[in-house]
């Protein structure tokens, strides 16, 4: 059986980052991707937080094919009949080096795969890995793809959150709908000048907008919008558990159509042409969803390792994927240099546990439980809408003082036992 230093299962950000790090150090590495090309199956919105990654592969970021730097942030809280939007920008957000960029994964991942090949790595597309090969001691020693078998000193599994190959091999448990969400999005073409006008941007700058409340009909989840050069990515993430257990029939694919018709969204997408529609599963378990990161002959990275974070006002995963690939490559290189490939697993685990990736997940450990409260997505968006109505809708006769308007609204909507208990619980997040 042909044998190489390392096989990477999956050609997404985690797998390609690992392969780039390995190939840069002269190791023989093969990436196997079942899509037509790297990025073909991805459904990311997408936004990459770059500031944590500047010291990882710094030579890549100046030439990476980003779409727009995010210089303006929007959060929209949607009630049943109203929406409140918070818009934020600052010199810190707009300053270079920019902290985050929008990107199109079909473009970005293909570019990164080319960088891997420039370093001497091999990227094989349109090829599915059917199983991981093991020896009599249950160590992973390679892969089988169709009739072909390839051996490796180390297999890095970066196949995504469905974990089809790794679950069959017994490397981790099969994911359940309880800790999963489904994301579905459209890419809508809009001229650059229209994008910049609608989101109050300078030429070349970008915006990120998050939505919560009526966008998911009060269920756990939210909406997102990211501006690209000549298009926007508009989508919804919906928790599978509340969608599955909801009383009454709901065709979830209609949520995006309803979202686009909402008075807060319709002017933003007006005149746009639909370029793409896609859907994908997303991990929502947070820290509790991270399995054992290594075993004999293998490392788990990216979504396969449960590395995704919904912290309410930021949604992250791509930076975690790249970092995990970076550390996986570093651990394998160090182990090969020491002449003990078995040292790669413990080294990788320690690097990850000591890294900002796991520490950020630890800081957000209680968020998945906190957002299981459906009042966050139903009562509070409508309560905020009613308070704003009290401020901006003038009735007949004399008006209350501003303080009295706001205080009476806050007292009515928030000063009750339920809200106090929920605020006490929010201290953990």
Image (cartoon, rainbow, N blue to C red):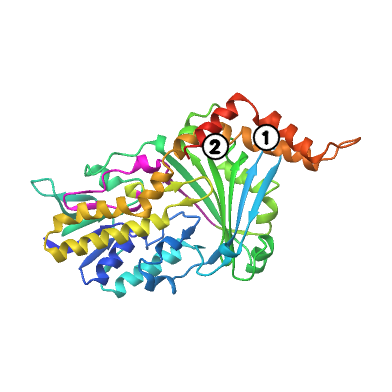
Query: Is residue 34 in sight in this rendering?
Result: no
- Discs 1, 2 touching: Cβ within 8 Å: no
Give above or below for 156 relative to 252. Answer: below
To which quarter of the image does residue 262 belong? top right
Residue 251 circle label: 2
Q: Nearer the viewer, mark 1 or mark 2?
A: 1
Residue at figure coordinates x 41%, y 66% from the top left: 54
Direction from residue 320 to residue 406 in the image, left or right = right
Instruction: Pinpoint residue 188: horizontal percent, then vertical percent.
Output: 59, 58
Outermost residue on the top side: it is 417
* Residue 98 position within the rendered picture, expressed as x and y whole percent measured from the top left: 51, 66
**Residue receiving disc 1:** 383
Compared to residue 393, the image places residue 413 above or below, namely above
Residue found at x 67% / y 62%: 200
What is the CA distance from the residue labelled 1 to the residue labelled 2?
27 Å
- Residue 20 location (% of width, % of height): 30, 67
Neighbour class for label 1 at 10 Å: few (<14), some, many (≥20)?
some
Question: For numbered disc 2, what is the local secondary structure?
Answer: loop
Q: Give the secondary structure at mark 1.
A: helix
The tag earlier along the polypeptide, 1 or 2, is 2
Judged from this view, the residue extending furthest toward the right is 397
Q: Is residue 289 rendered magenta in the image? A: yes
Q: Which residues lie in the magenta part? A: 276-303
Q: Is residue 426 magenta?
A: no
- Write the residue at 25% across / 51% down: 349
- At a point 45% along the width and 66% down the height, the residue shown is 107
């Amino acid at each position: 059986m042909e044998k190489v230093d390392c096989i990477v299962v999956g050609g997404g950000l985690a797998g390609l980052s690992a392969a780039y790090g390995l190939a840069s150090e002269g190791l023989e590495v093969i990436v196997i991707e079942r899509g037509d090309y790297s990025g073909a199956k991805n459904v990311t919105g997408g936004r990459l937080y770059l500031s944590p990654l500047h010291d990882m592969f710094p030579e890549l970021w100046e030439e990476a094919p980003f779409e727009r730097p995010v210089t303006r942030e929007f959060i929209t809280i949607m009630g049943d009949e109203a929406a409140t939007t918070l818009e934020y920008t600052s010199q810190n957000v707009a300053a270079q080096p920019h902290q985050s960029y929008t990107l199109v994964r079909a473009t970005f991942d293909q570019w990164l795969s080319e960088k891997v090949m420039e370093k001497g790595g091999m990227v094989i597309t349109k090829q599915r890995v059917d199983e991981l090969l093991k020896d009599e001691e249950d160590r992973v020693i390679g892969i089988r793809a169709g009739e072909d078998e390839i051996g490796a000193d180390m297999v890095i599994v970066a196949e995504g959150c469905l974990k089809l190959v790794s679950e069959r091999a017994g490397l981790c448990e099969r994911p359940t709908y309880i800790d999963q969400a489904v994301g579905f999005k459209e890419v809508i073409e809009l001229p650059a000048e229209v994008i910049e006008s609608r989101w109050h941007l300078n030429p070349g700058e970008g915006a990120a907008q998050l939505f919560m409340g009526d966008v998911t009909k009060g269920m756990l989840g939210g909406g997102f919008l990211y501006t690209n050069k000549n298009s926007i990515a508009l989508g919804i993430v919906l928790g599978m558990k509340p969608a599955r257990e909801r009383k009454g029939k709901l065709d979830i694919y209609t949520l995006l159509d309803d979202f686009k018709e909402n008075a807060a969204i319709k002017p933003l997408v007006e005149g746009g042409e639909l370029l793409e529609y896609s859907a994908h599963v997303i991990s929502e378990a947070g820290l509790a969803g991270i399995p054992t990161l290594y075993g004999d002959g293998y490392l788990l990275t990216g979504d396969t390792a449960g590395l995704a974070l919904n912290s309410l006002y930021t949604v992250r995963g791509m930076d975690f994927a790249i970092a995990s690939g970076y550390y996986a490559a570093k651990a394998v290189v160090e182990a090969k240099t020491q002449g003990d490939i078995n040292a790669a697993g413990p080294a990788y685990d320690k690097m990850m546990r000591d890294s900002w990736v796991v520490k950020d997940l630890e800081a957000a450990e209680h968020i998945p439980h906190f957002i299981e409260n459906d009042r966050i997505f139903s009562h509070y968006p409508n309560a905020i809408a009613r308070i704003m109505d009290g401020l901006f809708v003038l009735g007949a006769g004399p008006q209350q003082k501003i303080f009295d308007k706001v205080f009476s609204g806050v007292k009515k909507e928030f000063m009750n036992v339920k809200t106090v208990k929920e605020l006490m619980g929010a201290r953990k997040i």
